[in-house]
Amino acid sequence: MAGVGTSKEAAIIGAGAWGKVFASLMVQAGTKVSVWARNSRSFQGLDSSCFASTDLHRVLTGQSVLVMALPSAAVRQVASRLALPKDVTVVSLSKGLEAETNLFMADVLADALRIDRSQVVVVSGPNLSAEIAEGQPAGAVAACSDLARAQQVCPLFSTPLFRPYLSTDVIGAEVGGVVKNVIAVAVGAAAGMGYQTNTRSMLITRGLAEMARFGKALGADEATFLGLAGVGDLVATCSSAKSRNFTFGFNMGSGMAREQAFKVSAGVVEGARSAKAVITIARARGIEMPITEAVAKVVFEGGSIADMGEYLMGRSRKMDGVDIKLV
């Protein structure tokens, strides 16, 4: 296995909130960091130790580790422009499904960069960037089918307050990172309508069941959904006003029109983007995902928030339990 090299260096593509916080983590870990963004204004708040440029060539020269920190909709467009060594290791922070292909980000990156999927390390977990920026402890899963590659890249961003755990379940990590955003929209909508802890807990728990069913159908390890990339990320995203997806749902639940809720969002609402792709896959495979279905109806099919509640509460009775095997 190659692709990380002996020196602690990396290039980060994207200087959004998570990209800048991840750059700071890497600096704290002793990594020399170069950061690219389309607009130099994006570098405001970036750790001063980082080299920052809008010139891709200057950022990428000599790099064997690339961190992709872009919204999912921009990943292919930018990745297809990059000239990288064949043995590059790509760390993906992007969570979502490509709208045109319904591909997860590891597959999009492998295709656009013309590399093997085993060269992509997916980092996912309960990582609200504002809290990590404040120095609060957090952890994440670093998932790669090449375990040695994941082991080698983790020291680049491991600090006393940020602990990466290893996994070979790339699909599970990606499913968790996508579905949790959709469920957070629903939980936020419930909060916006005034529903409290019982209702939100029900949605989070049944959302975990949807995540597990979806992941199992796609070949994920069911145990992944009991870890940081599953229930950990789900709880964080569904419980915090710092989550764009929760806030988007909250605004709609409070009566704000969909277009206005998008407009006032402080960044990309991946849950709204992903709902359509997730439910398209689920319908094609016969996977039952009523919460995701309800979010897709509201965001893309003209349904109302009130309709979402009636749809979920009026369904036929089911057996409780999340279909996850521990052994």
Image (tube, rainbow, N blue to C red):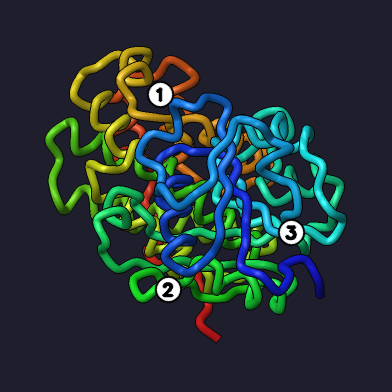
Which residue is painted at 58% across and 48% down in the image?
A: 34
Residue of label 2: 163
Q: Nearer the viewer, mark 3 or mark 1?
A: 3
Q: Nearer the viewer, residue 136 or 284?
A: 136
Few, some or many C-alpha atoms within 10 Å of disc 3 (few <14, some 14-19, many ≥20)? many
The percent coordinates of residue 103 (x first, y second) are 71, 42
Q: CA distance from mark 2 to mark 1?
A: 37 Å
Q: Secondary structure at mark 3?
A: loop
Which residue type does callout 3 highlight?
Ser
Q: Secondary structure at mark 1?
A: helix
The quadrant in which residue 59 appears is top right
Which quadrant of the rendered structure holds the C terminus? bottom right
**Left or right placement of residue 262 versus residue 230 in this view:** left
Which residue is painted at 35% across and 50% down in the image?
A: 129
The quadrant in which residue 55 appears is top right
Is there a contact, CB below 8 Å, between mark 2 and mark 3? no
Which quadrant of the rendered structure holds the N terminus? bottom right
Residue of label 1: 298
Q: Nearer the viewer, mark 2 or mark 3?
A: 3
**Left or right placement of residue 130 versus residue 194 in this view:** right
